[in-house]
């Protein structure tokens, strides 16, 4: 079978869930070959093999940590040249999308971003996307070169499929531009104990109806009961009630969880664009005419300050 190159997202050897989802999709197209870079790259091999990687290419160098993006593009291009894959798959993170775009330019290929599904086609992989602020769903394929495709988290199940996972060291030659932008400092993000927003299976979001930063405790309590991430609408973020890093929407983060609960969010197109591909959507809003109700699977017309605490209590009682 043709080989499919998968870019690995990991933290010190711990493989992140979107990469395991990519391996599931890659197996539909061919034999997955994983590229793991940086500190802990070799430690990813066992997990990658367990989920279908027939080969794991690894490389480590100070450039991957000390400089932005370009060294990783150099490595991905080296892997591409070594493998000659039928497709290149990356997670739809901000960094990975920049890597994907730069690689596509270098190899003269088309690129598809934010795919929500992949299937094999007679003329190459066919990607499903939500477009025009998620108002339409399209199927498309790259017509020139090797497809470079980024895939949104939660687009495929994580499936065990043990494979050889043979580890090979990749030789990477860094270009002149690799050291153009140096990382001079890092500030660790404060841990909340909650899942990463873009990767979470459940997201609970609050909007203008939360009516204050102090009231987000109601949203957080439900999220913690469900083991969910916390999101916020642009209105809530602009008001300073919640950090911008938690904004869901066209100008924030795009999420596609199994369950999305929108509390006190009217459903403006800006917000819908960031969550419309969620598998199940629940809205809680006291305005029965709110646009969000046109989109949801389940809607509750009521005051979120009455409904959400009751829901939290019910979830906790069932857990107990």
Image (cartoon, rainbow, N blue to C red):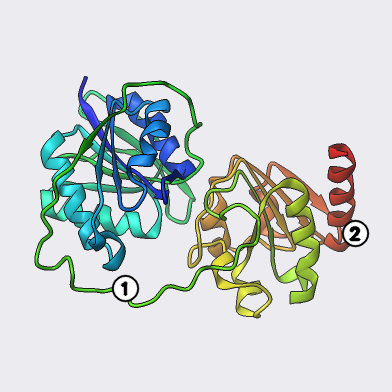
Horizontally, residue 171 falls left or right of residue 122, namely left
- The reply to whether residue 144 is in sight is no
Front position among marks 1 and 2: 1
Vertical position of residue 174 compared to residue 242: above or below: above
Residue 309, horizontal then vertical, whole percent: 87, 56
- Front-most of 174 and 206? 174
Instruction: Residue under label 1, please give it.
Output: 183
Cα separation between marks 1 and 2: 47 Å
Q: Where, by quadrant of the figure, is residue 262 drawn?
A: bottom right
Residue 42 seen in the figure: yes
Above or below — where is 196 with respect to 168? below
Disc 2 target residue: 306
Identify the secondary structure beneath mark 1. loop
- Number of other residues with Cα within 10 Å of mark 1, as a class: few under 14, some 14 to 19, many 20 or more: few
The quadrant of the image that shows the N terminus is: top left
| Residue 197 image point, x, y percent | 57, 55
Q: Quadrant of residue 258?
A: top right
The residue nearer to you, when weighing 231 against 59, is 59
Instruction: Residue at 31% x, 62% y: name it.
Output: 65
Secondary structure beneath label 2: helix
């Amino acid at each position: 079978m043709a080989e499919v190159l998968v870019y690995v997202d990991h933290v010190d050897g711990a493989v992140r869930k979107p990469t395991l989802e990519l391996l599931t999709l890659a197996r539909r197209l061919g034999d997955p070959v994983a590229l793991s870079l940086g500190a802990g790259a070799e430690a990813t091999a066992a997990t990658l093999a367990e989920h279908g990687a027939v080969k794991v290419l690894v490389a480590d160098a100070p450039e991957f940590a000390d400089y932005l993006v370009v060294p990783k593009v150099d490595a991905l291009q080296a892997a591409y040249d070594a493998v000659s894959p039928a497709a290149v798959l990356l997670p739809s993170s901000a960094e990975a999308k920049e890597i994907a775009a730069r690689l596509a330019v270098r190899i003269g290929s088309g690129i598809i971003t934010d795919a929500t599904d992949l299937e094999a086609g007679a003329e190459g992989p066919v990607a499903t996307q939500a477009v025009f602020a998620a108002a339409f769903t399209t199927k498309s394929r790259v017509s020139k070169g090797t497809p470079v495709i980024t895939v949104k988290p939660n687009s495929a199940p994580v499936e065990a499929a043990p494979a050889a996972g043979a580890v090979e060291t990749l030789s990477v030659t860094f270009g002149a531009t690799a050291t153009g932008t140096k990382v001079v400092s890092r500030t660790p993000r404060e841990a909340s104990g909650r899942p990463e927003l873009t990767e979470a299976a459940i997201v609970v979001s609050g909007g203008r109806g939360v009516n204050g930063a102090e009231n987000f405790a109601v949203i957080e309590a439900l999220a913690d009961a469900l083991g969910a991430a916390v999101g916020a609408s642009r209105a809530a973020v602009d008001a300073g009630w919640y950090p911008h890093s938690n904004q869901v929407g066209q100008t924030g983060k795009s999420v596609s969880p199994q369950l999305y609960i929108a509390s006190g969010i009217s459903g403006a197109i800006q917000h819908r664009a960031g969550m419309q591909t969620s598998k199940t959507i629940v809205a809680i809003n006291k305005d029965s005419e709110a646009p969000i109700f046109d989109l949801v699977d389940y809607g509750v017309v009521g005051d979120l300050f009455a409904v959400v605490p009751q829901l939290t209590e019910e979830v906790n009682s069932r857990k107990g």
